[in-house]
Image (cartoon, rainbow, N blue to C red):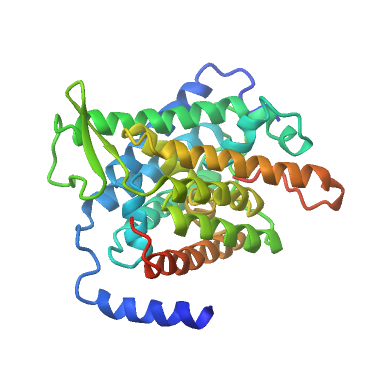
Amino acid sequence: MADHDSHPLFLPLVFVGGLIFGFGLGFSHMAQPEIVLNFLLLEDLGLLFVMFGAAVVTGVVFFIAPAGIGRAPLTGRAYGRRLKTLDRNVVIGGGIFGVGWGLSGICPGAAYASLGVGNYAILWGIVGMFIGAYVQGYWRSSDLETGTATAGAD
Amino acid sequence: MTHVVSLVFGLEALALLSDPFPNGIEHYLLGGLLVGLGTAVIYLGTGIAAGASTFLESTLSYVSSLSRFEQYRASRDWRVVFTLGIVAGAAIYAVTFQSGFLSSSLHQTATTGELYDVGGFTLWVTDVQPWRLLLGGVLIGIGTRVGKGCTSGHGVCGVGSASSASFVGVATFLLVAIGVAQLVAAVGVTP
């Protein structure tokens, strides 16, 4: 299960991927909560191009890689799609996330990038996200026997 | 609630017809393609479809022994590296295009928030009020983890995987967020 068994290029590659990802969030201005709020207020729909632009690239790569290439060179993993079980949690959690996103204009990846462009005020949001993640972890650790905890969510 | 939202939604949609893209689309599209490329680079090298919100729980596993976080111990190191990369990548944008040392017709200067100067570089800070960021953050921390993904996990990787759970997740948080943002603006909270 360890994702970084031994390959010396594993962490550098993850870092480079993060660099490109973060640069894109900066360049697109999705790292600015105001831009996200303007989108949610339907005043500037440009953000659709960020989300669909990104999903089109991953869609093509996630479709081609399993068919054309054997296994991932740095981990030996098989290429698979990102599939989660569709259950009540997806809707309940998505709804709670939606309230937070609509209130603040931030989401996790964009918040990390926002710090990079100099937005020190985003630390309020990042601290809040850790508090929220801890709170649900606390709840779900006390009732793990219900079997609702699902591994590997992104 | 549903009626209010759909009414507001309808009125806004009408207003939109004038100009849905007042800031153009080029920088949005290029930025989005780069977000996808970053995800694709990690995927091609490692087979991992990386989302951004798991970092919250995997990082908590360094300091908390709650059983919920145990499952993320194996991935916590690379998730820290991924997040540091995101911060650094955005910082590279800040010291190049945002600071004016690189320019492109595809680039759009910030029209929101405040630009400020540190050592010759131009940085940016939001005007959105701290309580909105903090309270929103708490809900995002809960919701993304309960809901199995965020804008990158569901929105970029999951939609790219044509996952039905992710289509439902994205539709849910997008519609709810539009409704909430409209309500917050309607009661006069700005910015």
Question: Is the residue B63 above or below the residue B30 in the image?
Answer: above
Left or right, residue B43 beside residue B185:
right
User: Which residue is found at the position 47% from the left and 55% from the top?
Assistant: A101
User: Which residue is found at the position 55% from the left and 32% from the top?
Assistant: B46
Q: In the depicted view, which residue is nearer to us: A72 or A147?
A: A147
Q: Can you give x and y, in whole percent of width and height, for residue B17 in the image?
A: 24, 77
Q: In the depicted view, which residue is nearer to us: A80 or B152?
A: B152
Residue B99 shows up from this direction? yes
Question: Is the residue B156 above or below the residue A94 in the image?
Answer: above
**Residue B89 quadrant:** top left
Q: In the depicted view, which residue is nearer to us: A125 or A26?
A: A125
Q: In the depicted view, which residue is nearer to us: B33 or A125?
A: A125
Residue A87 shows up from this direction? no
Left or right, residue A57 beside residue A152:
left
Numbered-mark total: 0
Q: Can you give x and y, in whole percent of width and height, for residue B37 in the image?
A: 39, 41
User: Which residue is found at the position 82% from the left and 44% from the top?
Assistant: A142
Q: Can you give x and y, in whole percent of width and height, for residue B51 in the image?
A: 53, 43
Q: Can you give x and y, in whole percent of width and height, for residue A94 in the image?
A: 58, 59
User: Which residue is found at the position 61% from the left and 60% from the top?
Assistant: B165
Q: Quadrant of the C terminus of chain B?
A: bottom left
**Residue B116 quadrant:** top left
